[in-house]
Image (cartoon, helix red, strand yellow):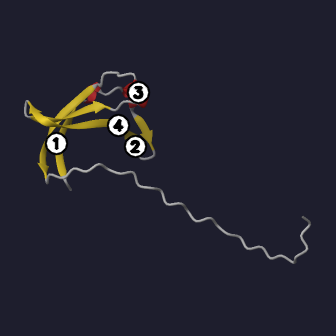
Amino acid sequence: MATLINLSIDVEKLPKQKFVKGKKGTYYNFTIAVNDETRYGNNVSAYDSQTKEEREAKKNRDFIGNGKVVWTDGNIVVAEREEQVAQPQATVEVESDGDLPF
């Protein structure tokens, strides 16, 4: 564990149309920014996650909460996407008498 962050979210600011129904519940996507500078005792901001189109259109981010880093070991790394392991193809052995019609 490299970092602990305490964060408060104003749930009234969450656009209800962006809630996502999943198999195990309802989810909401956030973007969390850890800033180098502290303002009012906080250095973490939470925003409503934007779509690619919203980012490309330079739409303003919707601020929904703030917080602060309360502990870190100084190591925060970028998460890398794990490659999905290809499932081996099933092989079927066919006995042949050598008299194929094609």
Question: Which mark sits nearer the N-terminus, 3 or 2?
Answer: 3
**Mark 1 element type:** strand
**What amino acid is labelled 4 in the image?**
Asn
- Percent from the top left, x then y, of residue 40? 7, 30
Q: Disc 2 vs disc 4: which is toward the camera?
A: 4
37 relative position to 21: left or right: left
Residue 29 is tagged as 4
**Mark 2 element type:** strand
- Percent from the top left, x then y, of residue 77? 25, 51
Q: Disc 2 vs disc 1: which is toward the camera?
A: 1
What residue lies at 64% left-to-right and 67% top-to-bottom? Answer: 90
- Percent from the top left, x then y, of residue 72? 14, 51
For residue 57, which quarter of the picture?
top left
Check disc 2: other Cα within 10 Å, few if <14, some if 14-19, many if 20+. few
Cα–Cα gap, marks 3 and 2: 15 Å
Question: Which mark sits nearer the N-terminus, 3 or 4?
Answer: 3
Residues at circles 3 and 4 in contact by the CB criterion of under 8 Å? no
For residue 54, which quarter of the picture?
top left
Question: Which mark sits nearer the N-terminus, 4 or 1?
Answer: 1
Question: Which mark sits nearer the N-terminus, 3 or 1?
Answer: 1
Residue 6 is tagged as 1
Question: Which mark sits nearer the N-terminus, 2 or 1?
Answer: 1
**Mark 4 element type:** loop
12 relative position to 90: left or right: left
**What amino acid is labelled 1 in the image?**
Asn
What residue lies at 25% left-to-right and 37% top-to-bottom? Answer: 32
Q: Quadrant of the N terminus?
A: bottom left
Residue 45 is tagged as none
Cα–Cα gap, marks 4 and 1: 17 Å
Cα–Cα gap, marks 3 and 4: 12 Å
Check disc 4: other Cα within 10 Å, few if <14, some if 14-19, many if 20+. few
